[in-house]
Image (cartoon, rainbow, N blue to C red):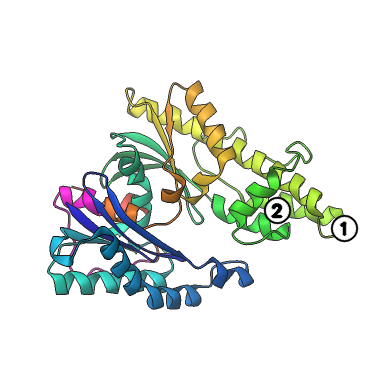
Amino acid sequence: MIVLGIETSCDETAAAIVTDGRDIRANKVLSQLAEHAPYGGVVPEIAARSHLDHIDRLVREAMDEARVGFDALDGIAVTGGPGLIGGVIVGVLTAKTLAQVAGKPLCNVNHLEAHALTCRLSDDVAFPYLLLLATGGHTQLVAVEGVGRYRVMGTTIDDAIGEAFDKTAKLLGLPYPGGPAVERAAKAGDPARHDLPRPMLGKPGCDFSFSGLKTAVAITVERLGHAPDVQEAADIAASFQAAVTDAVARRTRNAIEVFSALHPRARRLVVAGGVAANMALRTSLETLAASQGFTLTAPPLALCSDNAAMVAWAGVERLRLGLTDPLDFRARPRWPLGEVIGA
């Protein structure tokens, strides 16, 4: 089975060719960082126009690299949401047109489901497993029990973890994107320099909260009385990162307890999404997993950030089960993972 994947939900324009043998034959990703950096974040209108300018070329390049024509495809998969609606529409209309002209089955893929299933592309992880999904706009703990079978155990009640990193970077005068910038700065900082709060400390359940931590960072910067210099920014970044990793580990520990009660024999913890590229977070989760008798799996860094290979793979998973979509499905700016329908 050979599937074309298309991803345009945020600020990466991407196209990929993936087979059911877990062979990524092409994975083209065009970043828009330079276009959005002057604004300190993603501008939806700029993102949509950039997708429109580049998606056709990237699809052609992916197919040329994979050396396949439309006749060889078994299906086309596209991110139908959630995401910035203008960008999602660009990808959806492209995929619908190609599916109609080529006469190929179409899969409307939830962006979060694509992240959730990436570990099965990279590491052939068996169901069920516990997933920490950490992206710019979403932070969730999910029991992944099958394609279209997602039990959301915890989510953020305010900011997502990626948003917290971006806002912290802006407060510290660090460049966009904030996640990698904070991680780089933290390497030269003292994580014990500032006693920042651990959100939801001692509270039961698996939900997250990062708004208070972001506010604590803002207060710390304000108390300096001036823009932080390089070392001051590094110390605050390190303290913030330590607070985040500690808070995430505590909430994930709670989720492991719930997950273990549901699936006593399953011992796999997966971290996915762009924030999963943070090595301090990965190290913390590795320690936690080992202490609980679990194994941590994290996809390669290239498959953590938004890409089309994960979308194509989600298409493979859904096509295997006979799950396809009509041409009249709508792009969705919001699409909770719990609403994804499986077999």
Q: CA distance from mark 1 to mark 2?
A: 16 Å
What residue sits right under mark 2 in the picture? 215
Q: Quadrant of residue 259?
A: top left
Q: Amino acid at mark 1?
A: Gly
Question: Nearer the N terminus, badge 1 or badge 2?
Answer: 2
Count of numbered badges drawn on the protein: 2
Part of the protein shown in magenta: 315-332
Q: Is residue 84 left or right of residue 262?
A: right
- Label 2 neighbourhood size at 10 Å, few (<14), some (14-19), many (20+)? some
Q: Of 137 and 29, which appears nearest the observer?
A: 29
Q: Which mark is residue 255?
A: none
Q: Of 201 and 316, which appears nearest the observer?
A: 316
Answer above or below: position of 204 versus 182: above
What residue sits right under mark 1 in the picture? 225
Residue 230 x %, y %: 79, 53
Q: Of 261 and 296, which appears nearest the observer?
A: 296
Task: Report the residue at 43% width, 25% height from top.
Answer: 294
Q: Tell me the mark number nearer the camera, choosing from 1 and 2.
A: 1
Residue 126 x %, y %: 28, 34
Q: Quadrant of residue 109?
A: bottom left
Task: Report the residue at 56% width, 69% height from top.
Answer: 34
Residue 324 x %, y %: 17, 58
Q: Is residue 235 left or right of residue 133?
A: right
Magenta-highlighted stretch: main secondary structure?
loop
Q: Of 186 and 236, which appears nearest the observer?
A: 186
Q: Is residue 320 magenta?
A: yes
Secondary structure beneath disc 1? Answer: loop
Confirm whether residue 254 shows in the render. yes
Q: Quadrant of residue 91?
A: bottom left
Task: Report the residue at 76% width, 36% height from top.
Answer: 192
Q: Amino acid at mark 2?
A: Thr
